[in-house]
Image (spheres, rainbow, N blue to C red):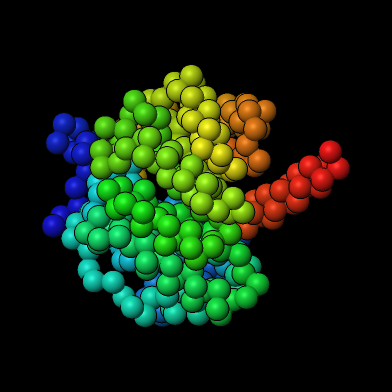
Amino acid sequence: MKPRHPEKVNNPINPIKKKPKWIRTKILDSQKYFETKLLLNKKKLHTVCQEANCPNISECWSKQHATFLIMGDTCTRACAFCDVKTGKPSFLDNSEPLKIAQATKELNLKHVVITSVDRDDLKDGGANHFFKVIMQTRLLNKNTTIEVLTPDFLKKGDSYKEVVKANPDVFNHNIETVPSLYRKIRPGSRYFASVNLLKMVKELNKTIFTKSGIMLGLGETKDEILQVMDDLLSANVDFLTIGQYLQPSSKHYPLQRYVHPDEFEELKNIALSKGFLIVSSSPLTRSSYHADEDFAKMKKLREKQYKCQKLQ
């Protein structure tokens, strides 16, 4: 099955707007970058850095940071913003949990991010595979903290509990955009199902940090963004990421506008004032961008909260 995108039929050509001066990336350490690339290729591992055409790949790989993409490189859904190919996925690789664990060790990662394509073809949406990857990674990397960025497990019952059972340090599920744009941007997903997933994860294990992210520049309004913040706070989400949507190709959903860094800073301050523990908000912010540093901040803030509660 060829890759498909919901906007392709009505809008076959959506010209890509020229990037403003504030969206620029560069390779910091070319040797480390190519060492990371070589290792990933050698183990035949996929990363969201490559498959989703992330703008931060050069910086992250130069620092030997990578976000592993498990369960293949083919997604069962066709989100209009995403550059991951859509089609019929291959069988699960039973050796993948060990390969992820070994790569984490060889890259000497102190914090690893593990995400996946949507696997609606699997009975549990791939939850058990997440469990195996987490457990194997922890077995070989005792001091490495683990962050997962999961699908919504829509119509998969309580399968998400399998991921929670593995006790990742951070459970991330991106809300991506505002409710009014879901039918155009995420036709295979449901806004409140995503919010509810984050809420249920926190109810099941209060010690797990929960995280979600939203893209700007798709046509959302400020009031809608603020409502998303409130909805995520009602689900007890700890960490919010806000980044710029970058249109991957002329066949993807058309970018409406580039949001100025000052607007990102304003939204960051609003989100913090509303009650999020950590907020990362900038044009180049992505779910796993500086995830290790942000986790360390979250951990310190949580410890500070506990101390304050004991003193009261």
Q: Is residue 213 left or right of residue 192?
A: right
The residue at 63%/28% (across/down) is 274
Q: Nearer the viewer, residue 127 or 115?
A: 127
Residue 132 in view of the camera: yes
- Residue 17 in sight in this render: no
Q: Is residue 131 above or below residue 4?
A: below
Q: Residue 104's quadrant in the figure? A: bottom right
Residue found farthest to the right: 311
- Is 104 positioned to the left or the right of 16 in the image? right
Q: Is residue 264 rendered to the left or right of residue 121?
A: right
Quadrant, the N terminus: bottom left
Return the residue nearer the eye: 241 or 12: 241
Where residue 273 appears, as percent x and y from the top left, is 67, 28
Q: Name the one closer to the observer, 71 or 123.
A: 123
Q: Position of residue 47 (x, y in %)?
A: 42, 63
Q: Is residue 184 above or below residue 75?
A: above
| Image vertical order of residue 174 relative to residue 46, above or below | above
Residue found at x 25% / y 42% = 188
The C terminus sits in image quarter: top right
Residue at 51% from the left image edge and 51% from the top image edge: 204
Residue 50, image x and y in percent?
A: 40, 60
